[in-house]
Image: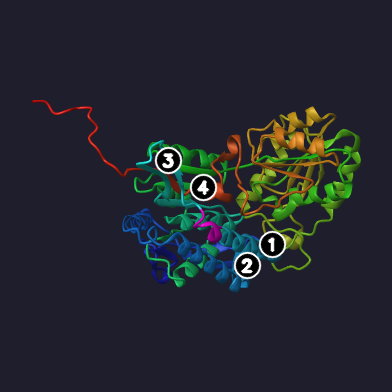
């Protein structure tokens, strides 16, 4: 029976694993079965990579005019909106997130494809003044080639779209490897690309364990570029592996993101958004504002009200209309979050709310209650490490300089926020924070047209925006002499 399950997409065809192995995907809200998918082997990955290489060498997509590639992406966006309900339901079942959050993700995914569809033909290169009227010197941007795309389980299709859309806009071929726990929307997007006529071999999908399926996407000699979104430990391994083959790398890794609240901030807005920053999507967001840094003159009141609000957050499954937050992705991840909280408490933090699994009504799911730890210090492991769960740590500051120093005291640098009514303070602090995205009096919004990425150990490269497209291109200088002549350096003798 297993060999009838064909959920790998290789060279334009749906195929089973060469071993016949499968994986059962469960919903983390109640452990119900979502589906059974093929578990790829190293041999399957090899076939996918070589299919992508053939398509690149034959230029079946690179030679399509950039404007036509853009039009294709716009048709993808239309198809995604037409099937929005189907995609959102699949995403909610795989991740356990609330359906309304998955629906919001689908709108963001559509916007991403629309953005890259519109700019696909807007980077024709540039002319270079060679100082010689007989010379035409130009810079062109060519597809980088075969791209390995490795994506996480928290925003499965959104993170994939940040890679697929620019890769296709630039004329590349790719192999997508989604997280093994959340494969279904990656399968659905392959259906869309195939139905709209993308040439065989341009888009390939392999499913399975990272060690078997993901590793070759950074080490294989036929891979030209690897883009990875995920944790620091895996990102470091991918970077080291890719370096052996001198491959282009884009890494969007973890974050320990400061949310700095000055005393003059709009109090209700800052309080509401502190909850949003830390607990949206169960805190399973790389840019989550889980490091709350509050000015000491308002800290006691602010944290007391934050705790009261956190204790009222309703947990539930994807289709529970009363739910305000969902489960974590797996039992293993829930155990990691619980251990992280416990170590924070042992290091001196005070548990103010949460710190436990969901109640009896959620015993089948992997829930963890929204948690607040205050009286935290910079060396506390709960402050230092990325917990990747619904846990907010609280630190306090007195002066602007102290706020900046605390916010920058992390090995990460992905995102952060500043809340203040003083525009001078807002701009000074935002310019000095070493984080790739800074929100002023807001938290979490992003724009497809604005670059996204981190400083320090939060990664290298950028996604989204014009730079996100350039990650998938290689600049080439073409120098044309329209009046060729003998150089005279080595004249004829005799």
Does 120 appear in magenta?
A: yes
Mark before the other along the chain sequence, 2 or 1? 2
Residue under numbered circle 2: 88
Residue under numbered circle 3: 242
Q: Which residues are magenta?
A: 116-122
Q: Quadrant of residue 56?
A: bottom left
Badge number at residue 101: 1
Residue nearest the viewer, comparing 430 with 364: 430
Asked whether the beta carbons under mark 2 and mark 4 sit within 8 Å of each other, the answer is no
Above or below 189: residue 301: above
Helix, strand or loop under label 4: strand
Mark before the other along the chain sequence, 4 or 3? 4
Badge number at residue 207: none
Residue 319 percent across, percent down from the top left: 70, 69
Instruction: Give the total number of marks visible in the rendering.
Output: 4
Mark before the other along the chain sequence, 2 or 3? 2
Helix, strand or loop under label 2: helix
Asked whether the beta carbons under mark 3 and mark 1 sit within 8 Å of each other, the answer is no
Badge number at residue 228: 4
Q: Real-space Cα distance between discs 2 and 3? A: 34 Å
**Quadrant location, the C terminus:** top left
């Amino acid at each position: 029976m297993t060999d009838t399950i064909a959920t790998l997409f290789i060279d334009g065809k749906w195929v089973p694993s060469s071993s016949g192995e499968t994986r059962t995907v469960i919903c983390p809200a109640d452990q119900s079965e979502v589906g059974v998918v093929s578990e790829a082997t190293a041999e399957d990955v090899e076939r996918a990579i070589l299919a992508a290489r053939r398509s690149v060498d034959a230029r079946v997509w690179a030679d399509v005019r950039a404007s036509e590639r853009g039009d294709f992406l716009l048709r993808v966006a239309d198809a995604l909106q037409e099937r929005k309900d189907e995609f959102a339901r699949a995403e909610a079942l795989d991740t356990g997130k609330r359906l309304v959050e998955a629906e919001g993700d689908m709108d963001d995914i559509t916007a991403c494809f629309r953005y890259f569809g519109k700019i696909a033909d807007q980077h024709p290169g540039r002319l270079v003044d060679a100082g010689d009227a007989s010379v035409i010197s130009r810079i062109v941007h060519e597809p980088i080639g075969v791209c390995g795309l490795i994506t996480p389980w928290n925003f499965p299709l959104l993170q994939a779209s940040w890679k697929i859309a620019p890769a296709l806009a630039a004329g590349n071929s790719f192999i997508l490897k989604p997280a093994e726990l959340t494969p279904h929307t990656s399968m659905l997007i392959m259906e869309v690309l195939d139905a709209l006529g993308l040439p065989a071999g341009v888009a390939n999908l392999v499913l399975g364990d990272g060690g078997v399926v993901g590793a070759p996407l950074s080490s294989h000699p036929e891979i030209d570029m690897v883009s990875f979104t995920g944790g620091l430990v895996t990102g470091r391994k991918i970077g080291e592996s890719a370096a052996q083959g001198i491959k282009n790398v884009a890494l969007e890794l973890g974050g320990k993101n400061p949310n700095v609240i000055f005393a003059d901030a709009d109090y209700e807005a800052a309080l509401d958004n502190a909850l949003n920053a830390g607990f949206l999507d169960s805190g399973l967001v790389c840019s989550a504002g889980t490091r709350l840094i509050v000015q000491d003159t308002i800290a006691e009141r602010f944290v007391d009200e934050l705790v009261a609000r956190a204790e009222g957050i309703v947990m539930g499954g994807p289709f529970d209309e009363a739910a305000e937050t969902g489960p974590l992705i797996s039992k293993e991840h829930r155990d990691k979050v619980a251990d992280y909280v416990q170590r924070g408490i042992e290091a001196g933090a005070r548990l103010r709310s949460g710190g436990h699994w969901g109640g009896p009504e959620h015993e089948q799911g992997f829930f963890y209650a929204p948690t607040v730890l205050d009286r935290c210090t910079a060396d506390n492991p709960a402050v230092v490490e990325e917990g990747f769960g619904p846990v907010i740590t609280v630190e306090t500051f007195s002066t602007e300089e102290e706020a900046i120093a605390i916010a920058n005291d992390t090995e990460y640098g992905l995102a952060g926020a500043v809340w203040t009514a003083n525009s001078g303070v807002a701009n000074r602090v935002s310019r000095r924070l070493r984080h790739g995205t800074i929100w002023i009096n807001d938290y979490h919004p992003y724009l497809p047209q604005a670059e996204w990425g981190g400083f320090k150990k939060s990664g290298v490269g950028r996604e989204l925006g014009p730079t996100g497209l350039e990650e998938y291109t290689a600049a080439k200088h073409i120098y044309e002499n329209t009046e060729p002549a003998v150089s005279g350096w080595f004249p004829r003798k005799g």
